[in-house]
Image (spheres, rainbow, N blue to C red):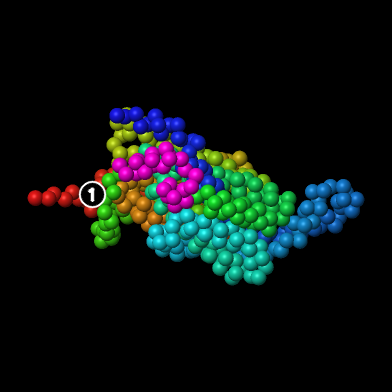
């Protein structure tokens, strides 16, 4: 009777659902590169001193030398790109505006996906985000207000795309393959962060900062073409799916207990302290993570005085550590649980503590080691690396306390994280505008304080048992 796994095995990596996971991986890659591209480009967009140095160097050097060096002519074009007088406070508002947009579409996009279909929602969101990325250099010439409007609209488009993914997987991913498929798709974001931070500086220096928007905006348009031609909302209507795979997906999903539509117990959720512990954990985690992903290139450039090319390369290194720690943390957590060495709630609180305490210590140490280049780089790599240990802590805790409402609660949790990102981006811009040295120290100390608040709250109220309001209610007929 139990010979079904063998039939599934032959379908795995040559199946349509794994092709869907790869295309979604590419979509996530595209969206994160479009989101982070401004963090790299803004160093060149506002760095007038670096532009003047290039101008002086070319004026002093002999013309024959310039003609003999082809890369020099590229720098000539780079010099023509506009340089804007945007204060750190203005930059903070620009960085946070995309999060405003995502929050605006967090709840409506899930509802609209059910009406128009997740394929159309995700594809439209990706297309709009790509077109707005291409438009960003022109928007910058028109003024900072238009840049903020464009980034907010881009956030709304990406919010549509992020939410639509869960609707598609609910119809395409068999329960036993769900974590595998979603991890393939989700890893595109980490890979995209690495690529944009590694290559963005090189693109800015070689071709000029506008090209970072042109290149990744164009990649997004290509991804949209692939998305609309290959992806369908469910396997039943896909013209290229094999009968074998279709039957496998449909039968696997039919085995799930599909309880009728239920109302969400909002009042019970609002009164649930274990849920608030998770929300506070997300708020704290995203506070520091947003600062790192948004301001890391600026910090390396302004504090360590590293040029834009090396700044981007150095900024990409923490994401290698982050992906490694995510995998290792998950393996270690499963090992502790499978061997019954620790209880579930102990594992959740242990990894939450490591993921909030260790990056806080590294962040607090950063202002005191700026004289040591190597030590600073090591600490900056450790901050996102150790922070991702939270993935085995409160980040998946909703599956423990309310599995029936896990996707809904994950959306709310991300909302708390996005709010933290908005506040932290704006606060960072304000603090470093007052004084660069003391400003960065205050940024890192404030981040550590927020992390400690979230950790304390989670250790006090976090739980791992299914809450009463989240349990299945069995009806008994007399």
Q: Label 1: few (<14), some or many (≥20) within 10 Å?
A: few
How many numbered circles does the render carry?
A: 1
Looking at the image, residue 58 lies above or below residue 142: above
Span shown in magenta? 232-255
Which residue appears at 44% of the width and 61% of the height?
116
Spot occupied by residue 450 in the image (x, y as percentages of width and height): 42, 54
Name the residue rendered at 47%, 43% in the picture.
241
Q: Tell me the residue that label 1 is attached to.
A: 471
Residue 179 sits in quarter: top left
Magenta portion: prevailing SS class: helix
The picture places residue 30, in percent across and down from the top left corner, at 57, 51
Question: Is 243 one of the magenta-colored residues?
Answer: yes
Is 477 left or right of 307, judged from the image as shown?
left
Classify mark 1: helix, strand or loop: loop
**Residue at figure coordinates x 38%, y 36% from the top left:** 333
In the foreground, 317 or 131: 131
Is residue 62 in the magenta section? no
Q: Is residue 156 left or right of residue 264?
A: right
Is residue 178 among what the camera can see?
no
Which residue is at 61% across, 52% downward?
222
**Residue 421's spot in the image, x, y percent?**
47, 57
In the picture, which quadrant includes the N terminus? Answer: top left
Which residue extends farthest left? 478
- Seen from the viewer's position, the closer of residues 197 and 4 is 4
Q: Is residue 150 visible?
A: yes
């Amino acid at each position: 009777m139990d010979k079904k796994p063998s039939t599934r095995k032959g379908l795995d990596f040559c199946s349509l659902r794994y092709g869907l996971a790869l295309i979604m991986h590419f979509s996530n890659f595209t969206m994160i590169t479009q989101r982070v591209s401004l963090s790299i480009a803004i160093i060149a967009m506002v760095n007038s001193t670096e532009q003047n140095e290039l101008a002086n160097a070319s004026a002093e050097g002999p013309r024959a030398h310039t003609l003999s060096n082809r890369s020099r002519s590229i720098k000539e074009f780079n010099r023509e790109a506009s340089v804007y007088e945007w204060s750190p406070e203005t930059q903070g508002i620009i960085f946070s505006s995309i999060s405003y947009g995502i929050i605006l579409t967090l709840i409506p996009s899930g509802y609209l996906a059910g009406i128009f279909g997740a394929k159309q929602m995700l594809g439209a969101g990706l297309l709009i985000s790509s077109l707005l990325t291409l438009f960003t250099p022109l928007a910058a010439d028109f003024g900072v207000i238009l840049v903020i409007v464009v980034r907010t609209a881009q956030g709304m488009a990406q919010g549509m795309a992020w939410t639509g993914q869960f609707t598609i997987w609910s119809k395409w991913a068999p329960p036993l393959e769900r974590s595998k498929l979603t991890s393939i798709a989700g890893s595109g974001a980490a890979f995209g962060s690495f690529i944009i931070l590694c290559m963005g500086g090189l693109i800015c220096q070689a071709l000029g900062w506008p090209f970072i928007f042109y290149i990744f905006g164009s990649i997004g348009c290509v991804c949209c073409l692939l998305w609309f031609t290959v992806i369908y909302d469910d396997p039943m209507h896909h013209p290229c799916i094999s009968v074998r795979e279709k039957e496998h997906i449909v039968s696997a999903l039919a085995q799930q207990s599909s309880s009728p539509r239920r109302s969400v117990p909002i009042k019970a959720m609002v009164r649930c302290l274990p849920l608030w512990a998770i929300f506070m954990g997300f708020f704290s985690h995203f506070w520091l993570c947003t600062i790192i992903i948004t301001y890391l290139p600026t910090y390396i450039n302004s504090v360590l005085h590293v040029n834009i090319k090396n700044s981007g390369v150095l900024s990409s290194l923490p994401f290698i550590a982050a992906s490694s720690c995510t995998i290792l943390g998950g393996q270690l957590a499963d090992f502790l649980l499978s061997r019954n060495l620790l209880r579930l709630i102990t594992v959740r609180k242990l990894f939450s503590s490591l993921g909030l305490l260790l990056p806080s210590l590294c962040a607090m140490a950063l202002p005191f080691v700026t004289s040591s280049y190597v030590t600073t780089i090591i600490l900056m790599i450790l901050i996102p690396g150790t922070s991702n240990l939270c993935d085995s802590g409160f980040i998946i805790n909703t599956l423990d306390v309310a599995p029936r409402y896990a996707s809904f609660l994950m959306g709310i949790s991300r909302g708390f994280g996005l709010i933290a990102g908005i506040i932290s981006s704006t606060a960072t811009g304000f603090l470093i505008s007052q004084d660069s040295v003391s400003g960065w120290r205050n940024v890192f100390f404030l981040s550590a304080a927020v992390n400690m608040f979230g950790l304390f709250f989670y250790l006090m109220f976090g739980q791992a048992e299914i809450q009463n309001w989240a349990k299945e209610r069995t009806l008994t007929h007399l």
